[in-house]
């Protein structure tokens, strides 16, 4: 299974692409740490410190710059590193499933299907933190399994300290671990775990240490998470729109839609097929997606109720707190937020399936039906991932190179170039040879609501990601358009 996932990942990885959004930030942090500049965005004007992205993923990836500091020639090593992380995570999940009674062939096949899905491949190709986070989730599942009787052994301070160490690593990988930490404390408290002071101290001590060290890291002028949230609310159009986004995310999680679309590329893209849109059947197709996901969620609930693992009740509490944090996060996490729950949700779904009366009395229903399903799953995921990470990604990379060459030729060194949050500043920096004023200006103006205080809007030139049919920002003129990438110039009368 591991070799299959690694081989498929090598086959699917595009030879050239862009590191955008979060992945570009993590690469910037890895470059800064690997070149001795510190945890900073070296490609931005002033090399500002990174403050809202925990540093562990960048720190563990910085060794690539020790071997080869030239990007993008080190792209192959970066891809291999990310593929190893993903394969390691899937191996840990496989072990956990087999230990809980799932057939080895089924566990391996499902891990292979997840490994070649476009979601996981996207996280790998764009250098996101989820593969490392999933490794730590798998390690936590293994640690949890080692002591299923933790609720009856409140004296196991060592176990709680180990759990706290894993939780600390998760927190330093993604801020989403805060909900997991809160869930563990609540579950342990009501389960009888850390009621003794030394156990609670043992769990929290590593967390307090790393959180304290992280809080000492220099912060950019944005002020950290509070200003980040207020900025995003302004982009979305106010707290009301943010609440609507949270309600939508909650509905998609509880109906199982995010899980099923994370697992199956076919289901995820069904309502977006050109044939479906042309026939005006998007609504019915969307309804079918929800019905299928609700069937899966019903199996998950049934499996949880039938589970004999005493630790599963505590796991459910942790999942609820994690989902609470994900739901209120002012970004649509979608399937990306649910991939970390697969170790438990899929195991519970299998328990729910095998506990059905018609399935329990028919052995073929536990072999042939799942076998046909996973073969179809692996095949469709592999095919769709190949189409997703094909020539289109390489074409975008070439477009950014052309934008960079235009900037080198036409923009004086004295002028400032900004880049919005949809543009890979990491690749644009190399293509243009210019440090950028990085922000979310173009994205805020064209996709959400105007946010005038965005720093990138102070630049004379602004690189944005926008389709050709989208009109330019008010007060700006388009100087060049390559694909969906556009260079805007501020009109003289609008200069602040």
Image (cartoon, rainbow, N blue to C red):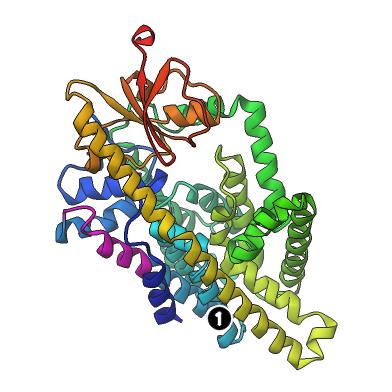
Queried whether the magenta region covers residue 16, the answer comes back as no
- Residue drawn at x 48%, y 21% as measured from the top left: 451
Question: What crowding class fits label 1: few (fewer than 14 Cα within 10 Å), some (14-19), or many (20 or more)?
Answer: many
Q: Nearer the viewer, residue 415 or 277?
A: 277
Q: Measuring from the top left, give residue 50's x and y in whole percent.
A: 31, 38
- The dominant secondary structure in magenta is helix
The answer to whether residue 225 is seen in the rendering is yes
Q: Residue at x 41, y 68 (%)?
A: 12
**Image point (41%, 19%), residue name:** 476
Residue 73 lies in the magenta-colored region = yes
Q: Which residue is mark 1?
A: 109
Q: Is residue 395 left or right of residue 428?
A: right
Q: Position of residue 22 (x, y in %)?
A: 40, 45
Q: Quadrant of residue 131?
A: bottom left
Magenta span of residues: 69-84
SS for tag 1? helix
Decide which of 184, 251 is in the foreground and name it.
251
Q: Position of residue 302 (x, y in %)?
A: 77, 70
Q: Residue 214 lies in what quarter of the image?
A: top left
Residues 421 and 248: in front is 421
Q: Classify residue 42 by image quadrant.
A: top left
């Amino acid at each position: 299974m591991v070799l299959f996932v690694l081989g498929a990942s090598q086959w699917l990885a595009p030879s050239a692409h862009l590191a955008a959004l979060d992945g570009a930030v993590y690469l910037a942090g890895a470059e800064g740490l690997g070149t001795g500049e510190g945890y900073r965005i070296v490609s931005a004007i002033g090399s500002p410190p990174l403050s809202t992205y925990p540093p562990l993923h960048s720190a563990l990836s910085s060794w690539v710059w020790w071997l080869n500091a030239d990007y993008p020639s080190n792209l192959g090593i970066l891809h291999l590193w990310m593929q190893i992380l993903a394969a390691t995570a899937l191996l840990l999940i496989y072990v956990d499933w087999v230990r809980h009674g799932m057939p080895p062939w089924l566990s391996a096949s499902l891990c292979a299907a997840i490994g070649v899905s476009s979601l996981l491949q996207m996280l790998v190709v764009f250098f996101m933190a989820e593969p490392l986070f999933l490794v730590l989730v798998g390690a936590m599942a293994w640690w949890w399994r080692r002591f299923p009787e933790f609720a009856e052994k409140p004296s196991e301070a060592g176990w709680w300290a180990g759990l706290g160490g894993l939780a600390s690593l998760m927190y330093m990988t993604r801020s989403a671990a805060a909900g997991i930490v809160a869930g563990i404390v609540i579950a342990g408290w009501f389960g009888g775990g850390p009621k003794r002071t030394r156990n609670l101290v043992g769990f929290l001590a590593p967390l307090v240490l790393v959180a304290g060290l992280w809080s000492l890291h220099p912060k950019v002028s944005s002020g950290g998470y509070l200003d980040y949230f207020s900025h995003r609310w302004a982009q979305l159009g106010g707290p009301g729109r943010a609440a609507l986004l949270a309600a939508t995310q909650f509905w998609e999680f509880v109906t199982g839609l995010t899980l099923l679309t994370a697992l199956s590329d076919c289901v995820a893209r069904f309502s977006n097929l050109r044939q479906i849109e042309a026939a005006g059947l998007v609504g019915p197709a969307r309804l079918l997606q929800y019905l299928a996901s609700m069937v899966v969620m019903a199996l998950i609930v049934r499996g949880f109720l039938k589970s004999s693992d005493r630790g599963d009740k505590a796991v459910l509490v942790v999942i609820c707190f994690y989902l609470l944090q994900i739901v209120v996060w002012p970004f649509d996490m979608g399937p990306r937020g649910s991939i970390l729950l697969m170790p438990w949700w899929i195991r519970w779904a299998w328990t729910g399936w095998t506990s059905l009366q018609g399935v329990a009395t028919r052995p073929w229903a536990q072999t042939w039906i799942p076998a046909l399903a996973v073969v179809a799953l692996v095949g469709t995921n592999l095919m769709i991932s190949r189409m997703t990470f094909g020539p289109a990604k390489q074409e975008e990379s070439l477009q950014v190179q052309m934008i960079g060459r235009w900037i080198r030729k036409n923009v004086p060194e004295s002028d400032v170039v900004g880049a919005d949050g949809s543009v890979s500043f990491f690749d644009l920096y190399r293509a243009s040879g210019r440090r950028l004023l990085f922000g979310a200006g173009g994205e805020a103006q064209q996709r959400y609501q105007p946010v005038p205080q965005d720093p990138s809007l102070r630049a004379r030139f602004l690189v944005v990601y926008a389709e050709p049919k989208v009109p330019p920002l008010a007060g700006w003129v388009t100087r060049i358009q390559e694909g969906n990438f556009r260079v805007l110039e501020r009109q003289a009368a609008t200069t602040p």
